Amino acid sequence: MSSIISVANLSKTYGSGFKALKNVNLDIKRGEIFALLGPNGAGKTTLISIICGIANPSEGRVLVGGEDIQTSYRKARSLIGLVPQELHTDAFESVWATVSFSRGLFGKPKNPDHIEKVLKALSLWDKKDNKIITLSGGMKRRVMIAKALSHEPQILFLDEPTAGVDVELRKGMWEVVRGLQQSGVTIILTTHYIEEAEEMADRIGVINKGEIVLVEDKTTLMQKLGKKRLTLHLQNKVTALPESLSHYELELCDGGATLVYDYDTQGERTGITSLLGDLRAAGIRFNDLDTTQSSLEDIFVDLVRTS
Amino acid sequence: MNHRAIRAIYLFEMARTWRTLLQSIVSPVVSTSLYFVVFGAAIGSRITEVEGVSYGTFIVPGLIMLSVLTQSIANASFGIYFPKFSGTIYEILSAPISYFEIVLGYVGAAATKSIILGLIILATAGLFVPLHIQHPVWMLAFLVLTAVTFSLFGFIIGIWADGFEKLQMIPMLVVTPLTFLGGSFYSIDMLPPTWRTVALLNPVVYLISGFRWSFYEIADVSVSISIGMTLAFLVICLIVIWWIFRTGYRLKN
């Protein structure tokens, strides 16, 4: 799959001396949903702002659809739709007027049919004549998505698209995003909701302190970094573990009723077989057992902690 | 050239004028009428003529300039400051539009509003005093040139301001005093020689003088100097705006 966005050696130092981005290299594949994860202040929004033309880079180069964002900014920017993190909307314009304005701003001829299609897809059609100030937060968020889609972009940036949006609406937005991907739009989203990335993304990038820590296919990432947890429900409560089990890093929980063992699925040996043998030898019996896969959130927290 | 984007910004800004019609148009017309009543009637009864023109008629070009200057600055500075304040500037900055086109949209709309306002005030003045314009084409040229130049100046203030207080500061503390002291209500020939020399340092003198010349062929300074000074200010504003966009000053950093 070819790259639609190519970021090379990108750095950004603000006037205060704060380095928001440090030598970032990143390629976004055409047609994918890419989730950019990172804690607050990691550089997510700065990276998006530079790609979209809102902030100037200090060093490095960005190509969008093969066009340099600085020397060929018209072509590059016309490919992009941006939904920023904050709810920046006009107050007294109608929904229809503000979405039409965005289309004009991107140099596209009037197309009421397209605007109608976008507003209907985002459940805003019955609000098209309402002033934006009268809309709820969730509706304003959708208006911003409608504005970003008004000029039929090939790339859509969604910076925290579902912040402050209720669960039902969030799932509705996921549907819209999936629909866009099916129509060929490349989507880059940043989110604090790890479940959103887990649910939506094809690939995941993690940024921390201005550096890209990792970029990986979501499933590969889950497999590669995913730990599993074995929980044994003991027949009889145990107050302390015998010496023969000390090298397993076991944890006694629920007042000695359960025994927890974390293991790496990618390791040469999981240690499960020997653990079960040693438990039997020590006379510790169990009624039941279950295993759970660690979530993307656990992986993310681990990565940020160690980077 | 992204003419659709220029049109979109221009129409968006003009729509704001129609939405705030009372504040944009009616309010300056009312205050100008008050100037006529206060200055024209009260002072005009003591000063009957200035350089062969009745006092009420004499102050018309100055009054129009007063409104055009302040409104050009107010319109353009607010037009660009508000998107910065509300955050909607992100859309302008991320659109495939050049700096020149952004300026054309905002400054074009601000200047249009000021020109419309100037013409409305001219028509209002016609209700109070008899008017005869000697050089209508030059009158329009001065009106357009001044509206564009001061809209550019307002655009710079709007970019520079990082709060509503700063947005008001230059118009209130610099432009209004300069306009009042720039011969709106008197000929600078009426001043003592020392103050006349001081007055010539005020750029607004040249604008009002040239504009008044287009009405009555009377001027405090030569018309060519008036045009030259206005054009010089226009060029200075253009250079500052070019620098703002080149460096991203208060926009992209």
Image: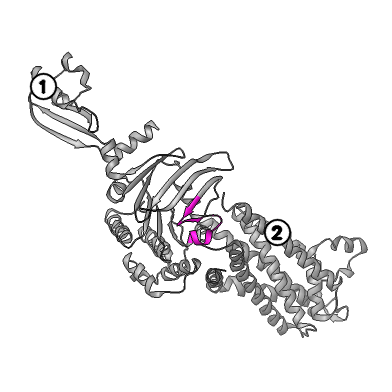
User: Does residue A129 belong to the magenta stretch?
Assistant: no
* Callout 1 crowding tier (Cα within 10 Å): few <14, some 14–19, many ≥20: few
Residue B156 position within the rendered picture, expressed as x and y whole percent measured from the top left: 65, 59
Q: Is residue A295 left or right of residue B41?
A: left
Q: Can residue A178 be seen by looking at this rendering?
A: yes
> Can residue B180 be spotted in the picture?
no
Q: Secondary structure at mark 2?
A: helix
The three-letter code of the residue at mark 1 reads: Gly
- Do pointers 2 and 1 mark residues of a single chain? no
Examine the image and state in which quarter residue B72 appears: bottom right
The location of residue B27, given as percent across then percent down, is 62, 72
Q: Nearer the viewer, residue A1 or B125?
A: A1
Q: Chain of mark 2?
A: B
Q: Which mark is residue B239?
A: 2
What is the quadrant of residue B98 in the picture? Answer: bottom right
Is A252 above or below relative to A128?
above
Spot occupied by residue A119 in the image (x, y as percentages of width and height): 35, 68
The image's mark for residue A30 is: none
**What chain is tagged by disc 1?**
A
From the viewer's perspective, is residue B2 above or below residue B213? Answer: above
**In the picture shown, does residue B235 fall above or below A20?**
below
Give the quadrant of the C terminus of chain A.
top left
Q: Which residues are magenta?
A: A62-77
Circle 1 is placed at which residue position? A277
A103 relative to A163 in the view: left or right: right
Cα–Cα gap, marks 2 and 1: 82 Å
